[in-house]
Amino acid sequence: MFKSSLYKAFNDYVFERMDDVLDRADKRDKDCMHFNEEFYKMQRRLVEISQQLKNEELRSIANKLEPVVNMERSLSVALAYKEGLRDSYRIQREVLKFLASPSVAVKRKAMEKQ
């Protein structure tokens, strides 16, 4: 029970953080802003072409692109964020192991005496 509650809380936190990251990227990151604009230009163009050709299937696909792209983007950000958390734990563990090594401990003690 505790483990599932902890897992849900972690996933909720990741979702909120991911949403924040995406929001900032959309508003402040020039590359993200550029590719968002390009995506929406292409999507609008597909809708225009579908209307000119009177192709309902093409229009339907063009309108379904945005949610699919947004979901893929969200999943990618969540995965990257989770991996970053795992990496930070591993890095911290390795740094602590390094600092606890005998050779570093001797150097630290010598520096503390000065």
Image (cartoon, grey):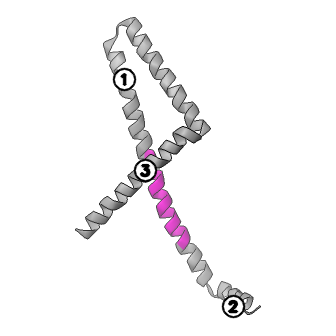
Given residues 13 and 47, the one toward you in this image is: 13
Q: Give the spatial CA distance, label 1 vs label 2.
A: 65 Å
Query: For the view shown, which residue lies furthest in the bottom direction?
Result: 113
Given residues 53 and 2, the one toward you in this image is: 2
Mark 3 lies on residue: 78
Q: Position of residue 107 (x, y in %)?
A: 71, 87
Residue 21 highlighted magenta (yes or no): no
Q: Is residue 65 above or below residue 28?
A: above
Instruction: Write down the quadrant of residue 8 in the picture.
Output: bottom left
Mark 1: amino acid:
Asn
Mark 2 lies on residue: 109
Disc 1 packing (10 Å; few <14; some 14–19; many ≥20): some
Q: SS of the residue at dot 1?
A: helix
Query: For the view shown, which residue lies furthest in the right direction?
Result: 114
Q: Give the spatial CA distance, label 2 vs label 3.
A: 42 Å
Q: Is residue 51 above or below residue 39?
A: above
Residue 87 highlighted magenta (yes or no): yes
Q: SS of the residue at dot 3?
A: helix
Mark 1 lies on residue: 63
Q: Is residue 84 above or below residue 22?
A: below
On-image quarter of the C terminus: bottom right
Kindly identify the residue that appears in the image at 44 percent across and 53 percent down. 17
On-image quarter of the N terminus: bottom left
Q: SS of the residue at dot 2?
A: helix
14 vs 30, left or right, is left
Sequence-first disc among 2 and 3: 3
